[in-house]
Image: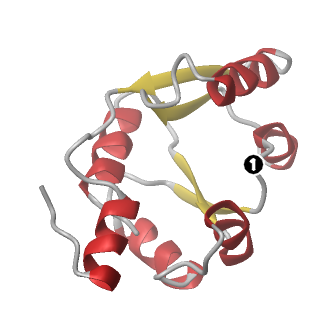
Amino acid sequence: MFHVGHLNLLRRARTHCRHLVVGVASDEYVEHLKGRPSVVPCDERIDIISALGIVDEVVIDRSEDKLAMWHQRPFDAIFKGSDWQGTPKGYRLEHAMQSVGAEVVYFPYTRHTSSSMLRSFLTEGGTLE
C-alpha cells in the first residue's frame, strides 16, 4: 500500500535524477514476496504513482532480481530505504548493481509507517503508533 514513506523516498529520488522511473510490483510478485495478495491491485497502484507530478515513467516490476529489471529498462541508480542498508539483501543488490555500473542510493526509512503496519490496522484492528 502506498504511504508517506514511499512518497518520502520518491521525493528524495526526484532530487537525484532528471528522469524518475518507478517500478511498481506486479500482483504476482507482491503475493510471492508477502505470501498474500496485494490490498491494492497493480493497475490501481500504477495509476496512483503515475498521477504524482514527480514521476516521469512507471514500469511493472515482476522480480526481486533488479539486474533483470536493469536489462529490461537500464538505469543509473536505484533508490532504497535505509532499512536495506547493511543487510544481506542490500549487499546482494549493491553487488548486482555494481556489475552494470548502477549505484544504490539509500534514503532514510520512514519508521512511523509501513505497508505491513497499515495492513495490520485495516485487517486485524491493530494500532497505528
Label 1, residues with CA under 10 Å away: few <14, some 14-19, many ≥20: some
Report whether 45 appears left or right of 25. left
- Check disc 1 and report the residue beneath it: 64
- What colour scheme was applied to this rendering of the protein? secondary structure
Query: Residue 125: x, y in percent?
Result: 22, 81
Closer to the camera in the image, 29 or 68? 29
Residue depicted at x 47% and y 82%: 39
Label 1 residue SS: loop
Residue 72 position in % (x across, y down)? 85, 49
At label 1, the amino acid type is: Glu
Q: Quadrant of residue 12?
A: top left
Q: Which residue does the image show at 66% across and 70% down from the upper left? A: 35
Q: Is residue 92 above or below residue 69?
A: above
Task: Look at 51% across and 33% down and name the residue there.
Answer: 79
Q: Quadrant of the C terminus?
A: bottom left
Residue closer to the observer: 42 or 18: 42
Q: Quadrant of residue 28?
A: bottom right
Image-based side of 87 in relation to 91, left or right: left
Total numbered circles: 1
Q: Is residue 41 above or below residue 118?
A: below
Relative horizontal placement of residue 123, taking residue 121 as reference (left or right)? right
Q: Quadrant of the N terminus?
A: bottom left
Q: Residue farthest to the left?
A: 129
Image location (x, y in percent) of residue 41? 54, 84
List x then y, in percent, for residue 62.
Answer: 76, 62
Look at 33% across and 55% down and name the residue there. Answer: 114
